Amino acid sequence: DPRGQGGSQGDLVRWAGDLDLIAGAEYLQGRPDVDPDRIGGFGSSVGGEILLGAAATSTAFKAVVSEGAGYRIGEADLTAFRKLVA
């Protein structure tokens, strides 16, 4: 369950999933039954965006697949796009 939802504790924080993914990957690195050099992630849509952010700031991820990721609302520089559609 996402942070602060369902059975998970903590406060509901928008876009904090990257921190949760990093914490999960770091947890896996310490398990004796997991090869720390073979930790990867798959995310789609917003999950893909969050995964890319996590992988960009953590060396725990050795492979990622992000399908359908886009810009987070309010964070995109749309200057070039506006010139194309004008």
Image (cartoon, rainbow, N blue to C red):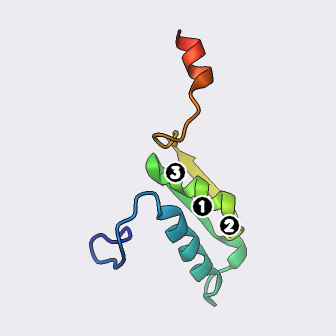
Camera-near label (1 vs 3) is 1
Counting from the top left corner in percent of width and height, residue 85 is at 53, 12
Disc 1, SS: helix
Q: Secondary structure at mark 2?
A: loop
**On residue 58, which mark appears?**
2
Rendered position, 9 above or below 73: below
Amino acid tagged 3? Gly
Give the residue displayed 40% in from the left and 58% down from the top. Answer: 14
Q: Nearer the viewer, mark 3 or mark 2?
A: 2
Q: CA gap, disc 3 to disc 2?
A: 15 Å
Q: In this view, which residue lies farthest toward the top?
A: 86
Give the quadrant of residue 11.
bottom left
Q: Nearer the viewer, residue 25 or 17?
A: 17
Query: Residue furthest toward the bottom?
Result: 32
Answer whether residue 36 is visible to the viewer in this image: yes
Of callouts 1 and 3, the N-terminal one: 3
- Residues at discs 1 and 2 in contact (Cβ within 8 Å): yes
Q: Which residue is mark 3?
A: 48
Q: Amino acid at mark 1?
A: Ala
Q: CA distance from mark 1 to mark 2?
A: 6 Å
Q: Which residue is disc 1 drawn over?
A: 54
Q: Are marks 1 and 3 in contact (CB under 8 Å)?
A: no
* Residue 42: percent from left, percent from top: 53, 57
Residue, x 52% and y 43% (percent of image)?
A: 69
